[in-house]
Image (spheres, rainbow, N blue to C red):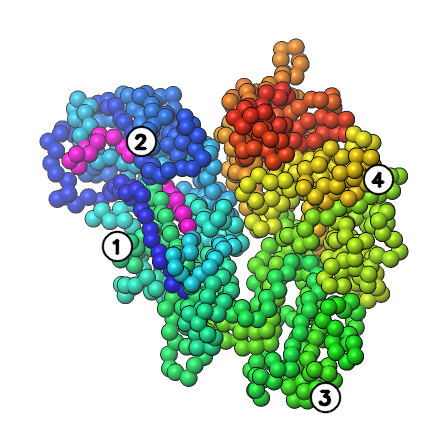
Amino acid sequence: MKILRTIYTLCAAALLCSSCQDEEMIKQSGVKEGIPVTIDLTFSAAIPKQETVGTRAGERNPENNVNDLYVLIFNRRTGALKGNVHFFSGEDFINNQNYPTDATLQGTINKISTFSGESMIYAIANAQESPSEYNLGGDASFENTIRSVKDIDDLQQICVELRSRNSTALNRIGETRYLMSGCLYCNIGTDGSITPVEENEDAKVKLYRTDSRINFTIQVGEGANCDNFTLLSYQVCKIPSKTSLVALTDANGNQINYDNRTESPDNYWDTESGLQPLEGNTLSFYVPENIKMAKNSSCTRYAEREAWEKGVNNERVFTNAPENGTYVILHGLFEGKVTESTHVSSGTEARASVDYIIHLGDWTNDSFGTFSNVRNVEYNYVITVNGVNNIIVEVETSNDDQDGVTEKEPGAEGDVFFQDGIFYDVDAHNEALLMKFTLDEITAVGTLDDFFRWRINSPFEEREANVDWLRFRLNEKNNNIYCTDRLQPYPGDSSAELMNLNALMDALKDIRTKKKDSEYADANGDLVVTCFVKEYVYDENVHNWGEYTNQTNREAYIFGEILDSEDGNSSTIHTKYVISQRAIQTPDLYYAGIGFGIETINETGDLPMGNVDPNNRFIDEEKGLDNTVAMLGSLTQTNFAAWGYLDAGIENYYAPVDYQYAAYACLLRNRDENGDGTIKGSEIKWYLPAIDQYSAIYAGTDALSTSSRLYTEDVWTIKHYFTSTWGENQYNIVAPWIIWSEEGFATQIFRGGDAVYESDVEDETDQNVLLGERKRTYRCMRNLGEGVREPYYSHNGNIIEFPHMKERAYRGQVINDVLSSHNQTEEQNRLYRKFQYAENYIQDDEGRNVSYTAAAVRRNDPCVRYSEDGYPAGTWRMPNHRELMLMLTAGLFDSLSDGAHVHCRTSFNFYGKENPRRDGQTKQAYMVQITDQGAIMQIPDVRGLTGTDDTEGFVRCVRDVVE
């Protein structure tokens, strides 16, 4: 694939200082050395100028904040420290510019004691006030280290380390205090004046962040052969876990290659694969500075940057890129046309699963040997996708009779499927598909067996290592002609009627030889089978379900030409069928117990729930499987004794009308494993989730693939989910709880007045029938593993903890001051690993709960003045939406009276847009409301698109718990 790569470097590299100075580099200043003086030092935070979408006018950009400052002044000739290490807190700063217009904060510190002479002034910002990304702030060991510095060499030996080795360490959120440092070469006069060595330089220390910001945008080239490219996921590799506190140079002023500092490979790490991009084909993250150059000087073209070979353990060994150079793997789906192929005609439609490897660095001036990401630089990589011709050429030249392989783009690899065959895109549950092979197709391939092939691609095993997830059964015949309008029922796992892929190929070969006389052929010589796709679960790893969840698709290519590149990293596929199956998605990190996973999409569309026996109650809030089994026996639309595989899901791919209800739809994700004609007992694995299981999905949303999240639309539409937990609504009718996913996680017992879908049946004479026939969406879930299912949170005392979520579901930074303005989609709304909630709501001096309007708590967080149990004011804040949801789930609001509300800090992302259900109204603020049916999460309507929410409610403060 040809890719146009453009980098925009938005800021100069950090000011670099050195302890070893050549005599000729230090001009005689004429300033007397060693006279005690006091100086006034000005500093400024040098930030790359960048338009930031979504930043509200008047809000302070946290990247500019300087909360505290260490100052160290060295003799420029000897490198010795002059006097003491100085520390200043924010209240020591004067002339502070907190609301800059030029993206620079500037302040001054008066009367710093030092000595005159040739000097280097170093400043280190935000080291004391606990920068979120690094493990140093507020730590006594760091305090001791910095105060023990005696010379410049001591300072340059100090490294700072990321708090954790997971993807959350690469994120920054609104409250982050960026670690910054800088230095000024100057002469300090006997009168305390500061004169920079460099002409035309300001007499101030410029502060630079220790990390780089990396942005990628992937776009389709104008007039390209690419109709669409979707970035599915990415991974960042060779991230330095530590970096120098201050920028480093050698004696000649050149940046030091960090590999020259005898670094251990253990200092570098990779994120987990499958990280999800931002909206659209974009991604953004931060990495510590990493100065690297090519292994050799022969790297003179872009393609040479990414050249690599397989190592002894199949790992990537780069030819020119440095061993520890940071790089990104972009995984995406290409859809477009082929223009360069010797095997298919030009213009053939193609679909390709591709990976692109891109090392960081700035090669805009043909500096192809540079692999550095420099501190305080923002790199914007614009990737333009034009086609997959380069991959195809590499594969085909690997298989022709000519010497040599043409590999134009070593950093691009993938599997290209020519779409004149049939492509099945299926979800993680059990599926049944129809496959037909005609006599003409079977005999057209000739006498060689090259086309009677199949290939399995799985993300975590060698090719063709597991074929058990596909089985085939001959379709029934009518007048010796295979039926093509009816799928066969599954005959049971041990049935002799099932064929594997090898047996299917043998059947096709038999037809090639015997034609219509083959036992497998019908009167036309055709072969028609039902293909049974097993759910994306590996029975041999039943206890280690973390191995196969949240993976990329596994794929099968059946009957046709499959060519591989010489290095085995790419292929072209020209087969009759391709099956691509999505993996189960889970927010759970593997543990020795039962997790749960969900399918990616609802394939049937909206369905009604049906009506239940009013004497039955499926009220369990945590056990959707138990609820679903009970519901299947209570729904009045169907005969319980008749439900089963033979009667549902096989005729024309649709369930009979009597079975088109949400609970039955989840049932049909299962399989009749023993072939007795019904799905029951342990065969029921997929089910409709309970309300708390939906809340667990929402709590861990950021660990799921983008396409599997409950709400994926970028506009405000109505999308409500049925749960299997039932309650009694205001009409005293038994009805299921529903989730309003367009609002993140809002809840309600289904009711007759909820006529919000165009398909809603209007029948005011019978609310029960009305509810039973109204359609909503749903998502099916499956338990993973064996043993005991632990709740996704634990509740001990006033501490709520989340021990089992995947790392990227968490908020990586501790926030115990005010949450900045944010909505439910932003990182401020993620959960930290555990939090403490206050013993009481904020109360007045009489012990009464204080009531605030929603608009008021959006302007000012009242928790900044709250204190409790040794945790002083300034360490508490209002909860975000997810924390409020967990407090509701834990029952903390059960004692409040009907009509009460409880606020959180999170706003609605579609505020200012018109409510699809209410003309001229919008929604703004998340809160809990106490109703006669119980506590619900909601966002009240606001009249007018610019109105504010004046709903009054209480506030219960929280704090992140680190210890």
Q: Is residue 614 visible?
A: yes
Q: Which residue is mark 4?
A: 617
Tag of residue 517: 3
| x then y, percent, for residue 169 | 48, 44
The amino acid type, in three-letter code, at marker 2 is Asp
Q: Nearer the viewer, mark 1 or mark 3?
A: 3
Tag of residue 365: 1
Q: Regarding mark 3 in the picture, which secondary structure is present there?
A: helix
| Along the line of sight, the residue nearer the viewer: 218 or 15 | 218
Main secondary structure type of the part rendered in magenta: strand
Q: Regarding mark 2 in the picture, which secondary structure is present there?
A: loop
The amino acid type, in three-letter code, at marker 1 is Asn
Q: Residues within 10 Å of mark 3 (few under 14, many from 20)?
A: few
Tag of residue 957: none
Mark positioned earlier in the residue sequence (4 or 1): 1
Residue at image position (41%, 42%) is 160
Residue at image position (89%, 39%) is 615
State yes or no: residue 197 in magenta. yes
Mark positioned earlier in the residue sequence (3 or 2): 2
Q: Which residue is mark 2?
A: 102
Residues marked 4 and 3 touching at CB (< 8 Å) = no
